[in-house]
Amino acid sequence: MPIAAALEIHPNLQKFLSKKSHPLLIGGRWAESASGKVFKTHNPATGEVLASVSEADSKDVDAAVSAARKALEGPWSKMSPAERERVLNKIADLVEAHSEELAQLETLNNGKTIREAKNGDLPLTIGLWRYFAGWPTKIHGETIPVSVPYYPGAKFLHYTVREPVGVIGAIIPWNFPLLMAVERLAPALACGNAVVLKPAEQTPLSALRLGELLLEAGLPEGVVNIIPGFGPTAGAALAAHSGVDKITFTGSTEVGREILKASAGNLKRVTLELGGKSPNIVFADADLEAAAKGMFMGVFYNQGQCCSAGSRIFVEKSKYEEMVQILAERAKTVRQGPGLDPKTQMGPLVSEEQRNRVLSYIESGKKEGAKLLAGGEAASGPGYFVKPTVFSDVGDSMKIAREEIFGPVASVMPFDSVDEVVSRANASPYGLVAAVWTKDVKKAHQMAQKIQAGTVWINCYHFVDAAAPWGGFKQSGYGREKSQYAIESYTQLKSVWVDLN
Ligand code: NAP
Ligand code: MG
């Protein structure tokens, strides 16, 4: 098997990877794509081919949407909420039982370290299934005391019902492949919808393995359909499809705009979780050791491939030089290697394309006059590695300070005052997350009020949970994933009037 790794591959995973090619999941059956085409998916640590995967296009999207519609009319809609909870809990149990092999698969296909896959992606994925498994029996409407101004004294019973939206199209990125899939599947299924999922072209494998577990858990056929393929073909066909009632998308702001345009035909609902250029703000009165860890992890977690990466680091002037040096020194000592090696601290980027994109940002930082303190180049050898890179003396108008790089590149900038740092932090079209480091409670909460972002972390970074809403302000998107607000967005409200006169 073409896998360079220090960790023994789980036997189930060996079996999964030994398949000649991985078919699509449509209507509860595994099938080749209508065109018969396949594409190759790679191990980014070596550049070697990991597997062949059937490539869906618009014909397969049609079939998957029909299968989802049929499932909505079949046993799925007749299941009681308690039965739906049992299915979701069974899925959670199965994912938990297979978490070792799923973590390895995620590492092999995405490049992330096995430590992050095991301690981050998998527990969060299981947490999402468990949290949303608790919801079906708690989704309910209300009775509302209505008054009818043109019918004085009249009596009506008015109540609301929360119904599923219908067929959900989920289009997801490659940075947290399994987690992104389950962030959509768990709430969508809890609310009784059916889903057509298009994973990212770079990382289709964990979603396909999850598909096997969904069937094993007894999920009725067609409730989840998984169709790997490419954005401009499969993704665009799903976004434009008149049989899809809602699209949930995570990815670039540019593609988010395309999704929105494509959705106009049947006015489908859209939630968008897009990019970010998030400010991580360190005041001189912070616990500087904790802040240093937070700066490092905030920008370099998952090789920097996080929509929430804290890639604009602002440090109060009196501590600026000290903090910049700490960050640069730590960056220089990072052990890079294949994610499956337990000693590895940072894996490769997901693809050659992504590596080249990140390197071109690094070049632009050098050209525009930022000071390079660590990294600044690709690592030698096979695989798509970029050294963790730290730039200081970055100007707000430089490309590296404005655009989402989606790689291990930190831009560090000094600031003098609260008002100044607030206005600079907010001077971005994005508004996904922000973090503030200070021991002054009043200042921390004042900052939380002033910063334009969907999530503000105080003295911490990258904390997420199934119960906490997640989504952006401004061009980081709209709608919220996770939490009770996802339940709202995967249901539609019906108003019922009963004449009691
Ligand atoms: P992307 O193109 O936005 O991909 C996200 C998803 O959308 C993928 O499944 C993609 O399919 C699909 N897609 C692409 N074009 C589409 C279209 N016209 N209609 C419908 N679906 C379409 O992101 P990317 O190319 O993977 O990465 C480029 C940059 O986007 C990154 O460098 C980063 O800055 C940003 N990004 C942000 C996030 C985030 O979490 N906010 C995640 C990933 C990327 P394919 O797999 O075939 O492209
Ligand atoms: Mg793409």
Image (cartoon, grey):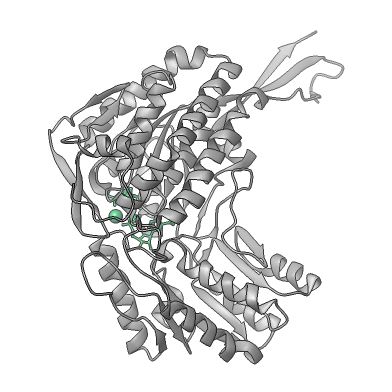
Q: Nearer the viewer, residue 103 or 56?
A: 103
Residue 23's spot in the image, x, y percent? 22, 32
Residue 9 vertical placement versus 413 (above, below) = above
Q: Please report the residue visible at 26 percent of the width from the left and 58 percent of the height from the top.
A: 44
Image quarter where ligand 1 lies: bottom left
Residue 25 vertical placement versus 73 (above, below) = below
Task: State the residue lying farthest toward the left.
Answer: 36
- The C terminus, quarter of image: top right
Q: Is residue 440 left or right of residue 52?
A: right
Residue 379's spot in the image, x, y percent? 28, 74
- How many marks on residues? 0
Write down the quadrant of residue 483 in the picture. Answer: top right
Residue 36's spot in the image, x, y percent? 12, 33
Q: Nearer the viewer, residue 290 or 459?
A: 290
Q: Is residue 374 left or right of residue 151?
A: left
Q: Nearer the viewer, residue 42 or 473?
A: 42
Q: Is residue 477 visible?
A: yes
Q: Please report the residue visible at 35 percent of the width from the left and 69 percent of the height from the top.
A: 336
Q: Is residue 428 visible?
A: no
Task: State the residue lying farthest toward the right.
Answer: 153
Q: Please report the residue visible at 65 percent of the width from the left and 26 percent of the height from the top.
A: 139
Q: Nearer the viewer, residue 225 or 43?
A: 43
Residue 78's spot in the image, x, y percent? 51, 12
Residue 490 vertical placement versus 201 (above, below) = above
Q: Please report the residue visible at 15 percent of the width from the left and 35 percent of the height from the top.
A: 20
